[in-house]
Amino acid sequence: MKINPPFVEKVLCAFIKEELSKFHYSRGIIGLSGGLDSSVCAFLAAKALGPKNVIGLILPYKKTFREDVRDARSVARRLGIRSRLIDISPMVDTYFSRFPARDKIRIGNKMARERMSILYDFSAKEKALILGTSNKTELLIGYGTIHGDTACAINPLGDLYKTQVRELAAHLGVPERILAKKPTAGLWPGQTDEGEIGLSYEEIDQILFQLVDDRQPPEAVIAAGFSRESVEKILSLIRNSEFKRKMPPIAKISSRTIGHDFLYPYDRNR
Amino acid sequence: MRISLAQVAPRLGDLQKNFELHHYFIEKARKKKADLIVFPELSLTGYTLMDMVQEVGLNPAKAPLFKRLRALSRDIDIVPGFVEEKEPGLFYNSAAYLSKGQILHIHRKVFLPTYGMFEEGKFFGQGKNFRPFPTPFGKVGLMICRDFLSFGAGYILFVGGAEVIIVISAAPGRGFSDEGGFATSRMWELMGEALSFFSSSFVAYSNRVGFEDGKAFAGGSFIYNPLGNLVAKAPAVDEQLIIADLDLEEVRSARKKWPFKRDDRPELLLQALQRIVYDNED
């Protein structure tokens, strides 16, 4: 599971640079949460595109997560990238004043989509492509909001497990405070990924790595020392989140159909 | 002979831009007095073509773009990769050897990877042969990417008399190695080292770089001499033209030292293969 951080940095910077230039963009925009993934993404983008070509949007809800806002700002300052703070509470509160909700997931998802909506508007306004920050762990277990934090133009981090992102972050010089933070989806104060899933990221990643990268059957992962309950939990999270990793199916009724037999690459003619 | 390998990143589906890229590197190699320039697999079209295969196919005998490439080959031999429309509506993943304005040979990829991230069997027809051919620089055998990973294919070129084995490739990198670079690059080097040594031939492997739909092509192009020693190697990720002087006499001296070629018995192997292929039914 160990990565080679300098090489990974080189490949990911080349990826960001090449993809943007293919689409005739020189700028990238990132939603900065003050957490590990978006900080790493900002470090890579600043290196690949130059700090002046990177915009970080800090999108807190009211005065919650003050420390995260401070950390996001410190990342922007340290990298010399442009950043902007936009409080999403007026938009979110207006909506929920009409359709009240107590379900934390509904509220959290709405916030994630509000941020997405602002990022896409700023993407057009600033002529900057959105760099995604979802890592491989989150994408595999479906720990993200569809059309929310998973929405982006390109994703440099999607093939790195959370623990590998941490390894890369240490190499890139991401501040110690951010490295030491408990990962959180930030849907509500005090929420932590590990608390919610009931496993540490080290455990989740080890299990995922054996199931996915090494193509091991679940029994082999259990035999390697993980509890049946943990392995089955991870498996069911993977199975139940396929819809977040795919374009929705189109009912095929014609002789040539998008997604079925009209097959072109994302980078078509780029 | 002076050989050059153009480790480039073609633009997906854009023949015109890719021709310009070829022209640029051909000029660069010519200025450095190279006798031959080898491009990667599908260098004129890019790799992840999918349905675009049917839009960028070229018939080398008729396509104006090939006429221009043939003209450029008057001063320097050229090996490009392209989608060949051999007959109307029949598409192959092909490599050509151009020399002095002529097409000396076309190799159609035999082993089309169709698993995991690869879908070539869905879009290309399958080539049928590995056949070395004479060039101004000895007998050359061509392979494309996955062809090279079949030791049978390398063996056929060896028996056919190849002295220089040229592999054009679009191999994506996967996994990490301690030394830096992709873990999968080792697989290609391993075959390069083994095949060059045991066939007492030069092996030149030209791989591409750049990204397509997130796939990172691994670069790491290399040349091994007939004693299995590394002559030159390009880095991962970066576009580069690598140049090396090959002394074809080394084929002779390697074969005097290690008589693998003299002692080979293809007729016995053929009989054994026939027994395996025809007697052992599934």
Image (spheres, rainbow, N blue to C red):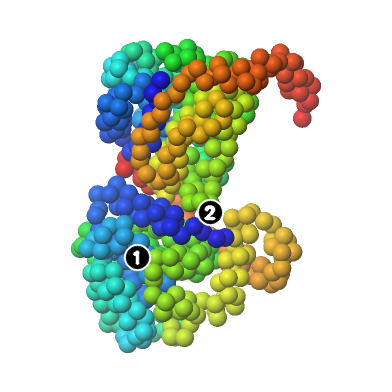
Where is residue A265? Give x, y as percent: 40, 44
Residue A199 figure quarter: bottom right
Could you say whether the residue bearing mark 2 is in a helix, strand or loop? loop
- Determine the residue positioned at 42% across, 50% down: B214
Residue B121 vs residue A179, the one in the foreground: A179
Could you say whether the residue bearing mark 1 is in a helix, strand or loop? helix
Picture layout, residue A79 above or below residue B274: below
Asked whether residue B262 is in view, the answer is: yes
Residue A177 figure quarter: bottom left
* Structural crowding at the residue carrying mark 2, measured as other residues with C-alpha within 10 Å and reported as few (<14), some (14–19) or many (≥20): few
Give the residue type at disc 1: Phe
Which residue extends farthest bottom?
A: A63
Asked whether residue A185 is in view, the answer is: no
Picture layout, residue B234 above or below residue B107: below
Task: Say which quadrant the N terminus of chain B sits in.
Answer: top left
Picture layout, residue B126 above or below residue A116: above
- Determine the residue positioned at 51% across, 34% down: B230
- Determine the residue positioned at 35% across, 61% down: A44
Residue A144 located left or right of residue A93: right
According to the picture, the residue beneath numbered tag 2 turns out to be B178
Where is residue A32? Give x, y as percent: 33, 72
- In the rendering, which numbered label is found on residue A242? none
Which residue extends farthest right?
A: B279
Task: Say which quadrant the C terminus of chain B sits in.
Answer: top right
Which residue extends farthest left?
A: A125
Where is residue A130? Give x, y as percent: 32, 61
Where is residue B67? Give x, y as percent: 30, 17
Residue B262 located left or right of residue A75: right
Give the residue type at disc 2: Asp
- Determine the residue positioned at 48% across, 39% down: B171
According to the picture, the residue beneath numbered tag 1 turns out to be A43
How far apart are the alpha carbons under marks 1 and 2? 23 Å
